[in-house]
Amino acid sequence: MSDQGSGVVLVTDVAVAPVVGPEIESGYIRIEGDRIAELGPGPAPDVPGAVRIDGSGCLATPGLVNTHHHLYQWASQGLVQDATLFEWLVALYPVWAAMDAEVVRGAATAGLGWLALSGCTTTSDHHYVFPKGRGDLLAAEIEAAREVGLRFHPARGSMDRGHSKGGLPPDAVVEDLDDILTATAEAVDAYHDPSFASMLRVVVAPCSPFSASAELMTESAALARAAGVRLHTHLAETLDEDEHCLEQFGTRPVDYMDKLGWLGPDVWFAHAVHLSDGDIGKLAATGTGVAHCPSSNGRLGAGIARVSELLRGGVPVGLGVDGSASSELTPLSGEMRQALLFQRARLGPRALSARQALELATLGGARNLGREAELGTLQPGKLADVALWRIDGPFTPAVPDPVCALVFGPPPPLTRLLVGGRTVVAAGELRTVPQDVAGRAGVAARRRLLRAAEEQGVTVGSELDVRSRSTRRS
């Protein structure tokens, strides 16, 4: 769907929650090209030839920013339903070892479409399983992101510590250190676009302390900093990880990362559930960010991250849906509510407000990705990534505060999603890739993955089969 016309798009008669600056009860947003030119209260200016989007009954927010995901996991949802993180990983590594580029392309198409339908305009993706001889997996998800139309930050993940070296993953799914560094450098050279309006930026992202060697971590950090790209990894997700780090390295996760040079304003960690006050102080002092994934943490019984304390300490915090296999069909918009409820369950009703939750999902995520100058708020000069939420349905008018209506309850319908002024979702339907095509791609990816896994001797007839048989093999 084209929104170009004269090059001007006007969103009219809309409530606006810009995240930074005063909220507008009824006003307009003027977009020129891919940038926000103006917003304000009252009627929109008359611009001949402008494309007008009727925002009456809607709330405009910045497009949401997803700071942690594993798109390939769309193809393995619903498996290993009642396991801890380590049990879940041990069970699913043999399944994921069967993926190929076609699986990744289909899973990413479905996963990115689902993100768009939940108001997401920018997403990272942490892909760290690269079976040999299965095609170009990173290119497959990058092409899917181009078709769906979201800004994409693929995090080229890696694992070199297999079971034989004291790591958690089986040796069959890890890579050689030199191969990882070569492939990562090539990905940065081939795809990374540092421009202001970039649709594609590459991140360097060894998987975790229990699957990546100290050498991989330090060499990856050096590579990323030489290239001017960001760093990402999992950290402090479970108490099992605490025990692993103490046993293997003689220190807790954040201190281990500090030792390896992995704290800084160019780094953000996924989860960071089990942090001490001292850990939070280190993250704050170094500007290191956190991706909070409440639904996945709840699904795996990992715990509740100390988001309120992180925010009070000045740590950049964004939201993430995490992989679809640990957070089935979780909408990014719904993670605002989950984050709010989890913190209030811990610390009481003033632990996190609706507007703080919206900021986590927008500006907080932009900060994690190093894009707060471009994304995360509705302000003149920023990119025109805008979500319009319908808040005039038969029940939502009973909630007079539109931000409360967005965050406290089930997410209201998404009526329009603009990425750089271009429509990606309209009237609740994906408009770049046909919605039914995206859905079928995800189903086909799952069938292909599970069939390939079974051909390799992995029984995947039920969640119990996957968990029990794979755990016995380990």
Image (cartoon, helix red, strand yellow):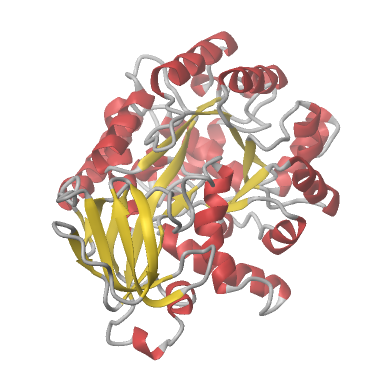
Front residue of 199 and 71? 199
Q: Position of residue 415 (x, y in %)?
A: 26, 66
Answer with left or right where residue 276 lies relative to residue 69: right
> Which residue corresponds to the image point at 52% horizontal and 45% vertical from the top-left?
373
Does residue 6 appear in the picture of this structure?
Answer: yes
Q: Quadrant of residue 187?
A: top left
Does residue 455 appear in the picture of this structure?
Answer: no
Q: Position of residue 48 (x, y in %)?
A: 15, 59
Answer with left or right where residue 330 lies relative to residue 169: left
> Which residue corresponds to the image point at 34% horizontal and 32% vertical from the top-left?
141
Q: Quadrant of residue 221?
A: top right
Q: As displayed, is residue 288 above or below residue 308?
A: above
Q: Position of residue 342 (x, y in %)?
A: 61, 68
Q: Give the mark count.
A: 0
Q: Quadrant of the C terminus?
A: top right
Front residue of 131 and 463? 131
Front residue of 38 and 261? 38
Answer with left or right where residue 175 lies relative to residue 443: right
Q: As displayed, is residue 91 above or below residue 416?
A: above
Q: As displayed, is residue 176 above or below residue 113?
A: above
Q: Position of residue 315 (x, y in %)?
A: 70, 51
Q: Quadrant of residue 193?
A: top left
Q: As displayed, is residue 441 above or below residue 163?
A: below
